[in-house]
């Protein structure tokens, strides 16, 4: 069984999402030591913005980079994604990765009834880290475009039940940071086994 571990925080050792994705992977690996983990750090090794040169075609080096990212995703049974909120949505580095994953003919196809997802059956677990509070009913709920965006993008390719672990209010103060992070780490440690 293969697990793809994706981080996208630009904050290095100070990141909140990184320890959470690490805890998720550790939890799943402890339950299934044979789990084959592939790691991709989109902040230290960013994929470039998608351009025409990266679109499927004649096999140029630019396309090879895109295909490698797509193949890693296609091969994975479980995908763990660190998704910080930057300016109300996901980091552009993570968007560049999504631009490789949502590929017609590979993860979705067009039919006479509209688009159909082809990537169902994968387990996707997402660690969301947010400075403010965006939960249902909060004044900023309508500005939440991390969880809502990822749910829409994943549903489009057939993944309807992603699991979310959310640490929020991280910038409100040190106590809130500690409480949110430890709550998320606890949830990670209690995830159902792979
Ligand atoms: C460039 C940047 C933009 C941010 N924009 C937002 C924002 O729009 N809303 C918010 O609640 N927090 C925002 N934050 C705070 C982050 O969500 C918070 O620092 C969180 O810990 C980021 O996750 P990470 O630590 O895994 O990188 C921003 C942080 C950075 C660095």
Image: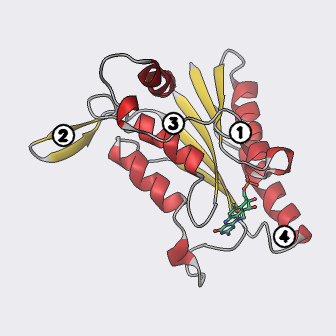
Which residue is found at the position 72% from the left and 26% from the top?
Answer: 29
Q: Pick whichever of labels 2 and 3 is earlier in the sequence.
A: 2
Q: Secondary structure at mark 2?
A: strand
Q: Which residue is mark 2?
A: 110
- The residue that appears at 76% across and 44% down in the rendered structure is 18
Q: In the image, which disc is placed on residue 24?
A: 1
Residue 194 visible in the current orientation: no
Distance of label 4 from label 2 (alpha carbons): 45 Å
Of labels 4 and 2, the one closer to you: 2
Q: Secondary structure at mark 1?
A: helix
Q: Is residue 104 left or right of residue 127?
A: left
Identify which residue is drawn at 55% across, 59% down: 146
Residue that numbered label 3 is attached to: 123
Q: Quadrant of residue 182?
A: bottom right
Question: Viewer-proximal residue, 11 or 122?
Answer: 11
Quarter of the image with the N terminus in it: top right
Task: Determine whether label 3 and label 1 are within 8 Å by CB.
Answer: no
Q: State the residue position of label 4.
A: 176
């Amino acid at each position: 069984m293969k697990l793809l571990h994706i981080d996208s925080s630009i904050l290095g050792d100070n990141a909140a999402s990184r320890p959470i994705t690490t805890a998720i992977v550790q939890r799943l690996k402890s339950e299934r030591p044979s789990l084959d983990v592939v790691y991709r750090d989109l902040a230290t090794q960013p994929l470039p913005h998608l351009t025409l040169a990266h679109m499927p075609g004649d096999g140029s080096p630019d396309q090879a980079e895109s295909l490698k990212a797509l193949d890693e995703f296609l091969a994975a049974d479980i995908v763990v994604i660190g998704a910080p909120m930057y300016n109300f949505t996901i980091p552009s580095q993570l968007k560049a990765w999504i631009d490789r994953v949502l590929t017609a003919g590979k993860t979705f196809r067009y039919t006479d009834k509209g688009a159909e997802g082809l990537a169902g059956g994968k387990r996707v677990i997402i660690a969301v880290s947010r400075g403010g509070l965006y939960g249902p009913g909060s004044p900023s709920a309508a500005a939440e475009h991390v969880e809502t965006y990822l749910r829409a993008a994943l549903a489009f390719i057939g993944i309807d039940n992603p699991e979310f672990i959310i640490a929020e209010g991280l910038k409100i103060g040190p106590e809130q940071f500690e409480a949110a992070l430890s709550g998320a780490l606890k949830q990670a440690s209690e995830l159902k086994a792979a």
